[in-house]
């Protein structure tokens, strides 16, 4: 067992940390206030090779391993959850193509995504189907050499700012989960449009929109995997997304710890720095303990993915634990900063709003607890 | 175009370096080594010239084994080859002994068109190594470069001076030292990081280059640093009480005693 990062992971972590400190962190507050997508900054990430970090070189990636990808998201999330989440989401459709796409699909769509020319989104959720994702009602109907897609998707991250969308629809209404298929839809395809942009409480620099398909015709060769395999593909890549969520949760918790630590050492009360009070020390200790434990679990999950082992339960544990840790860390950081923590002049209240979606998306925590619990009870 | 960049690993300048009052040495514990900032400008320019003219960029550094980390970072930014000059006998070198080893190593490399340095290292700050190497190799030197344009084997170089910019034309091969106005260094690239991390770095010791042992390291250094200390920053606040007249009189007395007036 070895918990040391290897040379490439250390070098990458250092680079992303530097990049985040210099190019990203100072823009986060502005993104939060304006709710605008940071096009220029994302272009900078793309130009610096971020889009393809944990993918094979032959598809335009950097050849990094799973942990390298997770470390990237973790470091970015320290400076901006919005930016880290945008990149994490880009890797969801990339994984669909990488793990289930044909060679032609990879060349045509994955390569430009990994080299940073194109951004991607993944769409499963619908107005009437979130946790119950097998209950989607949008449809795909075969018509000679095309599929005709109809229906609405909601809460789609990178919606409106992406070039490539991987969208799941029902191609056989008579079947449940097994009637779902996944399609690649390019921006600008006739019949495909972007609906309402959500006015979110946090992660406001990431774009979350509705997608509308009205007789949207996509070529047959744009189906990923076989007909009816869409749900299986979605579950597989969402499961891996839970590792990414773990990295995001750890990153923002570290940001909370760092703000709280700095403030505790500087703020004087009763003639002493508040860091000298045990109550404050305990808050800091709890934050640090949970972060340390989460990093160990993240390393384990990353190593299981690397070896191709099944780790859905572990990834779910990581996602649930780190999302709740992040909420607690943000709440506690606010407490350490006292009244100042409750204002928008300091970052913890933003961290709290930014962290909340981690408990909801990529499998709501209630649903994942059910997955973890039932797996353990069965075993 | 064969381009060589000499880089020095220095203590991270964003972290305050302390000096041990007993040993008179820099406290290096816990301080990470980074590429000297101006050397990054030198490297960035080398990579840009390679990108526009073709050729190869080699980075070279003299120092202990941990300097490999900085060389790997240089590879990840876009250098093609890295050489570490490391030997116990190179240790304790002043600028003369450092330049001697660098010059001998450069001779071994053979044909080089441009040799780039930082304008100075931010730790010892002498700015002598580039110019000394140029002298030892008998090459023209242009210091404080803030702009370089390439035209075949002729370079037009702007020198960033205090009150003016001087433009110089030079025929290659030549030595150039870089200042921060030259460019904005890029970040290491992820793909190149993966390759650099796995790459063996060539290490040359004293037997790998032609050197005269008497000119190496401490032995070959006419300069010796006798003492090095942080300026003591003792600020004492003294409040002078009393009426304005009394306080001014007291202030006048203090300033007199301290020979300020
Ligand atoms: C910021 C953000 C980004 C998102 N990005 C995407 C995206 O890119 N692509 C995409 O497809 N979707 C995306 N989503 C949607 C996300 O996946 C869903 O919000 C999530 O699956 C939950 O679905 P829901 O919102 O419909 O809630 P519901 O499923 O309606 O759940 C409501 C509540 O009921 C609970 N609940 C539901 N079922 C059970 C059960 N069986 N047992 C116990 N409790 C239950 C849930 O835990 C939750 O607390 C995003 C959501 C957010 C907030
Ligand atoms: C506090 C302190 C004071 C010192 N004062 C003196 C002094 O007054 N006189 C003296 O002779 N020595 C002095 N030294 C020793 C000095 O550190 C070494 O001689 C060093 O190897 C080069 O000097 P420099 O850092 O001033 O380099 P500079 O001449 O400032 O460096 C210019 C450029 O030369 C290149 N370069 C420098 N060192 C290397 C290297 N090891 N490998 C590859 N490229 C390199 C880099 O491109 C760098 O940007 C001092 C050291 C310390 C720690």
Image (cartoon, rainbow, N blue to C red):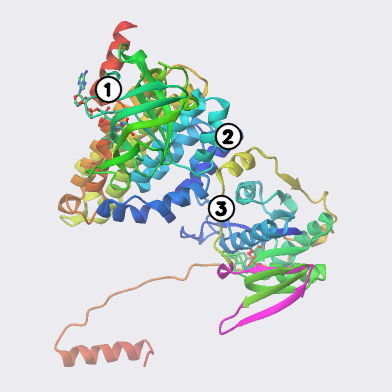
The magenta segment: B160-182
Please provide percent x and percent y for residue B256: 34, 91
Query: Does the image show residue A45?
Result: yes
Mark 3–mark 2 Cα distance, whole angstroms, equals: 34 Å
Residue at 81% x, 55% y: name it. B109
Disc 1 marks which residue? A137
Q: Which mark is residue A59?
A: 2
Q: Is residue B119 magenta?
A: no
Which chain does the numbered disc 2 sit on? A
Are the residues under badges 3 and 2 in a single subunit?
Answer: no
Secondary structure of the residue carrying tag 2 is: helix
Q: Residue B225 falls in which quadrant of the image?
A: bottom right
**Could you tell me if the residues under marks 2 and 1 are in contact, i.e. CB atoms within 8 Å?**
no
Mark 2–mark 1 Cα distance, whole angstroms, equals: 34 Å
Q: Residue A289 falls in which quadrant of the image?
A: top left
Q: Residues within 10 Å of mark 3 (few under 14, many from 20)?
A: some
Q: Residues within 10 Å of mark 1 (few under 14, many from 20)?
A: many
Disc 3 marks which residue? B33
Residue A105 versus residue B56 in the image, above or below: above
Question: Residue lying farthest front?
Answer: A144
């Amino acid at each position: 067992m070895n918990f040391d990062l290897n040379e490439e992971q250390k070098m990458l972590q250092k680079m992303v940390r530097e990049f985040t400190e210099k190019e990203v962190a100072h823009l986060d507050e502005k993104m939060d206030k304006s709710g605008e997508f940071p096009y220029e900054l994302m272009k900078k990430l793309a130009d610096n090779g971020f889009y393809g970090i944990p993918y094979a070189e032959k598809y335009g990636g950097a050849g990094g391993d799973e942990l390298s990808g997770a470390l990237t998201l973790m470091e970015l999330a320290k400076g901006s959850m919005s930016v880290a989440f945008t990149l994490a989401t880009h890797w969801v459709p990339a994984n669909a193509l990488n793990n289930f796409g044909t060679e032609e699909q990879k060349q045509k769509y994955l390569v430009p995504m990994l080299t940073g020319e194109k951004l991607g989104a993944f769409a499963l959720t619908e107005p009437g189907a979130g946790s119950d994702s097998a209950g989607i009602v949008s449809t795909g109907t075969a018509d000679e050499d095309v599929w005709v897609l109809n229906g609405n998707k909601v809460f789609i991250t990178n919606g409106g700012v992406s070039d490539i969308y991987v969208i799941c629809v029902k191609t056989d209404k008579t079947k449940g989960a097994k009637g779902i298929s996944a399609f690649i839809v390019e921006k600008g395809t006739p019949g495909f449009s972007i609906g309402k942009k959500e006015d979110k409480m946090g992660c406001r620099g990431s774009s979350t929109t509705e997608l509308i398909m009205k007789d949207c015709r996509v070529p047959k060769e744009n189906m990923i995997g076989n007909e009816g395999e869409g749900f299986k593909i979605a579950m597989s890549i969402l499961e891996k997304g839970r590792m990414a969520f773990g990295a995001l949760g750890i990153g923002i918790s570290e940001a909370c710890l760092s703000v709280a630590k700095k403030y505790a050492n500087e703020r004087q009360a009763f003639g002493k720095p508040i860091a000298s009070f045990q109550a404050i020390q305990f808050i800091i200790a709890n934050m640090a303990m949970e972060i340390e434990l989460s990093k160990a679990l993240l390393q384990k999950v990353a190593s299981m993915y690397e070896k191709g082992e099944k780790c859905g339960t572990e990834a779910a544990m990581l996602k649930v634990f780190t999302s709740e840790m992040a909420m607690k860390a943000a709440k506690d950081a606010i407490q350490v900063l006292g009244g100042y923590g409750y204002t928008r002049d300091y970052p913890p209240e933003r961290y709290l709003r930014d962290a909340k979606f981690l408990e909801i998306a990529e499998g709501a925590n209630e649903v994942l607890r059910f997955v973890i619990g039932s797996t353990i009870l069965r075993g | 175009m064969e381009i060589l960049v000499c880089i020095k690993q220095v203590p991270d300048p964003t972290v305050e370096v302390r000096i041990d009052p007993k040993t008179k040495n820099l406290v290096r514990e816990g301080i990470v080594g980074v590429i000297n900032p101006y050397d990054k400008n030198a490297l960035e320019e080398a990579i840009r010239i390679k990108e526009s003219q073709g050729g190869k960029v080699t980075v070279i550094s003299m120092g202990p084994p941990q300097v490999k980390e900085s060389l790997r970072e240089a590879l990840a930014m876009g250098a093609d080859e890295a050489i570490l000059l490391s030997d116990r006998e190179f240790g304790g070198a002043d600028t003369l002994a450092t330049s001697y080893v660098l010059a001998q190593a450069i001779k071994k490399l053979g044909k080089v068109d441009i040799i780039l340095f930082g304008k100075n290292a931010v730790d010892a700050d002498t700015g002598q190594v580039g110019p000394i190497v140029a002298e030892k190799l008998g090459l023209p030197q242009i210091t404080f470069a803030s702009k370089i344009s390439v035209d075949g084997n002729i370079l037009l170089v702007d020198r960033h001076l205090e009150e003016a910019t001087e433009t110089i034309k030079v025929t290659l091969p030549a030595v150039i030292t870089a200042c921060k106005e030259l460019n904005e260094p890029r970040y290491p690239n992820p793909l190149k990081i993966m390759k650099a991390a796995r790459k063996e770095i060539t290490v040359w010791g004293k037997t790998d280059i032609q050197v005269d042992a008497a000119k190496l390291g401490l032995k070959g250094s006419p300069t010796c640093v006798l003492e090095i200390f942080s300026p003591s920053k003792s600020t004492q606040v003294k409040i002078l009480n009393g009426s304005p007249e009394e306080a001014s009189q007291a202030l006048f007395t203090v300033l007199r005693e301290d020979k300020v007036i």
